[in-house]
Image (cartoon, helix red, strand yellow):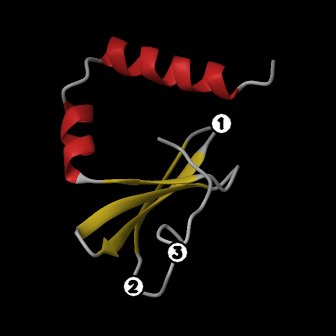
Amino acid sequence: MNSSPSSSEATHQEDVLLCRVSCESASVAVLLHPTGNGRRLLLVSERTGQRTLLDATVLDALCALTPSAATALVRTAVQEGAPA
């Protein structure tokens, strides 16, 4: 899901900051980002600068995850991002 910024994901004037979600180890800005195919959520890690766009289909799929499945997904993503 995370990726380096691309021109289509770059923060621009029409983006609307909805909130910041933070804990002791991370802080993420959540913005509403208009695209040619409708609005998406733009998530930006304030620690790393990594960003990703999420559409309604992805958000709907995330809602179906159990807490243990969500934990496993995050654990896998963190392990893949760790240096070898």
Instruction: Give the image location of residue 40, x and y in percent.
Output: 30, 62
Instruction: Give the image location of residue 16, x and y in percent.
Output: 39, 76
Q: Which mark is residue 25?
A: 1
Mark 3 and mark 2: Cα distance apart in space:
8 Å
Give above or below for 49 relative to 18: above
Q: Earlier in the sequence, mark 3 or mark 1?
A: 3
- Location of residue 51 (image quadrant): bottom right
Dot 3 alpha-carbon crowd within 10 angstroms: few under 14, some 14 to 19, many 20 or more: some
Of tags 2 and 1, which is closer to the observer? 2
Residue on which disc 3 sits: 11
Q: Secondary structure beneath disc 1?
A: loop
Mark 3 and mark 1: Cα distance apart in space:
23 Å
Q: Earlier in the sequence, mark 2 or mark 1?
A: 2
Name the foreground residue: 49 vs 83. 83
Q: Is residue 28 left or right of residue 16?
A: right
Give above or below for 1 relative to 53: above
Residue on which disc 2 sits: 14
